[in-house]
Amino acid sequence: MTIRYDGQVAIVTGAGNGLGRSHAIQLAARGAKVVVNDLGGTVDGSGGGSTASQAVVAEIEAAGGEAMAHGANVADFEQVQDMVAKTMERLGRVDILVNNAGILRDKSFGKGSLEDFKLVLDVHLMGSVNCTKAVWEIMREQNYGRIVVTTSSSGLYGNFGQSNYGSAKMGVIGMMNTLAQEGAKNNVKVNALAPTAGTRMTEGLIPDQAFALMTPETVTPAVLYLVSQDAPTRTILAAGAGGYAVAKIVETDGIYLDDADQTPEAIAEHWDAIANSEPKQLQAGFEQTVKFLGKAAQAKGISLE
């Protein structure tokens, strides 16, 4: 089986360099018409220009593909709307959206500014919201869509000096979890990529030998799968240096405490049973409510039917 995207249109944000460039080039190589979005700024989000995105378009066209560039700032919804409008005018549809654009403003929480925190949220979280919102009804009306948000191990597990980045990257997981449910009846699948790659955003943070193993090209196959016709939905796929794994958010089964025992002391006493009981991946937030109500009803001999 060969995965291809003939006749499909893909928008890739932050596609002038690094991961986004690799995603765009490989999507085009497999038949997609690609919108190469890039503001053209530096790693911290300052500056701008179209040189990088135009170079990627030229590379795609030289290989026989079709592409167009757009310099929308993903944090600006009006610019994003313009990008999508021009895509529809020229290419007629949007099948794939890869939310990849991002910046870094790394500092420990005590030393970082609120302005930097908000900026990182605006680009990573609201940028993903803006782009997804702009294509959402298009995908629903055509009963087909594949959306990828880019999360990070910094959001899933934490990383010193990246409270702003980690908050944004965990925020897109919450969006993915809900949109996967809302898009299901219209065949709109929403997934998350958790990449680790040697790009200008990680340059200088890891040894040169490791950097050489962590090419963007080792991550892109994960994106190509997540935007394919038979992709899963509501999945966090981690990728880097040729390794691929699924990250899951789980909740222990937990316990029920009688009314008189619903105290912090009782929680401390039963902590092992609370923290180490069998974990389960819930498929919707309300499942947690159903679980706790079920335990309470059983303990009290109450029927909830």
Image (spheres, rainbow, N blue to C red):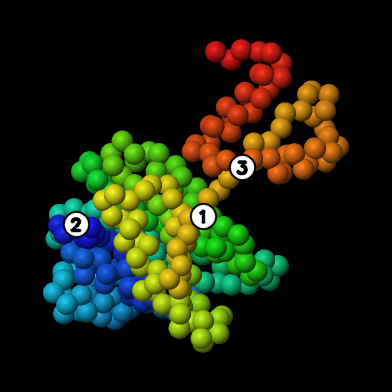
User: Mark 2: which amino acid?
Assistant: Gln
Q: Position of residue 19 (x, y in %)?
A: 38, 71
Tag 3 residue: 279
Mark 3 or mark 2, whichever is nearer to me: 3
Residue lying at the far front in this picture: please name it: 1
Tag 1 residue: 247
Mark 1 or mark 2, whichever is nearer to me: 1
Q: Secondary structure at mark 3?
A: strand
Q: Quick one: 77 or 32, which is closer to the camera?
A: 32
Compared to residue 124, the image places residue 303 above or below, namely: above
Q: Position of residue 270 (x, y in %)?
A: 80, 37
Q: Secondary structure at mark 1?
A: strand
Mark 1 or mark 2: whose residue is earlier in sequence: 2
Write the residue at 50% across / 47% down. 174
Tag 2 residue: 8
Question: Could one spot residue 76 in this view of the protein?
Answer: no
